[in-house]
Image: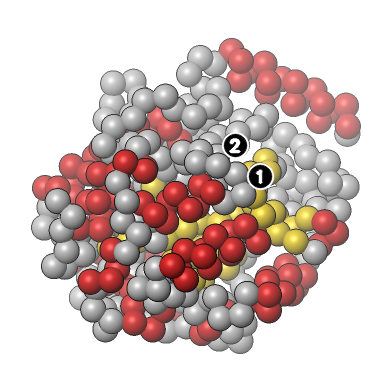
Amino acid sequence: MTNRRALIAFTAALLLLALPGQASAQPTTSTDAFNSLTVESHPDWMATVPDGTSLAALSLPGTHDTLAIHGGLAPWAYEAQEDHGDSAATLTAQLAAGVRAIDIRVRVVNGGTAFAIHHTDVYQNANFDDVLTTAAAFLAAHPTETVLMDLHGECDADTTEGGSGNSSIGHCADDPSNTTEAAREVLFQSYLVHYPGLFYAPSVAGSSTAAMPTLGQVRGHIVLTTFTGPRGQVYPGYGLTQLTTGNWAQYVENDYQQCNLDQKWNEARANLVNASNDTAGNMYTTYTSANCAPFGADPADMAGGYGGGTGINQRLLDYLKGSRASHTGTVLTDYPGHSLIDAVISSNPGMSLN
């Protein structure tokens, strides 16, 4: 098995080298819509939003795979965000820029005693403590704000080959702690103990999910929107009811393997239109991200454009500038540019950053 893994890894490395433009690297170009996160700063933009506003009625800029700033040998482990530093310094930059929805991927490490931030089998030089410390410091300094967090288990217990902590191309190997679903939940609960009051309590009760809150109820807190395992298992008793029970998938667009720019944009736009037209108080979530590397477009290609096609970020910016959307819901992007973040924020009723 070890020789097979080594052969697959070597073959994958050769393929990566043979594919120009597909090596895992931060993009070098930037536009108003793409890869220019920190040109503007909006750390307190929620201050003018009335307390009684439902979170579902907001337009929230977010990042997909929020701390995926390091690539690796695995063909699918491509960076998804601008690198503004390890130990969640990248999260600090995103929050200051106006991002309010984050996508955190954790792997169980250290014998089952800690969460490390991962993108597939690639450690992102940050731990869950870094994320929570960073978020706590930001919310303490900016108490009018809230942060929505999608928490997802990465790697551990997600393999068909087994193993003892050795990564394999094609799968993330089991963690040495042989993590179970129950153990992952207990570990998350231990973080709640160490960060009392940081999370909006109804979203982390463990016994019931939370009704859609108003902004006034969650200012100064992290709202856990979903808590899922490596295979997408939903942890009952955590998150927001509308996003974790019933027909929640009808409110989410996340076709992450659709790398045709036109088709991906059509799917994203349709969900944005549904969000704008909704009158029932539902929270819509649109992922503009996709990745088909190494044999197709990588996250930077999709966000910034490739092959002469306009990137999803620019299409989203053009749509927001040209539409009269009542709101967008939560929009999670790769490599957001400053104008794109501005445009999402400005889609909130009565707000304009222009």
Q: Quadrant of residue 111?
A: bottom right
Note whether residue 190 is visible: yes
The mark found on residue 25 in the picture is: none
SS at badge 2:
loop
**Inter-mark Cα distance, 2 to 1:** 8 Å
- The residue identified by callout 2 is 70
Left or right: 183, with 29 as reference point: right
**Mark 2 in CB contact with mark 1 (< 8 angstroms):** yes
Task: Identify residue type, mark 2.
Answer: His
- The residue identified by callout 1 is 125
Q: What residue is shown at x 71% (from left), y 20% (from top)? A: 11
Q: Quadrant of residue 54?
A: bottom left
Left or right: 292, with 108 as reference point: left
First in sequence, mark 2 or 1: give its number: 2
Note whether residue 80 is visible: no
Along the line of sight, which residue is nearer the eye, 318 or 5? 318
Q: What residue is shown at x 25% (from left), y 58% (from top)? A: 345
Along the line of sight, which residue is nearer the eye, 323 or 83? 83
Q: Nearer the viewer, mark 2 or mark 1?
A: 1
Along the line of sight, which residue is nearer the eye, 116 or 281? 116
Q: What residue is shown at x 21% (from left), y 64% (from top)? A: 348
| Residue 165, horizontal then vertical, whole percent | 84, 46
| Residue 7, horizontal then vertical, whole percent | 80, 23
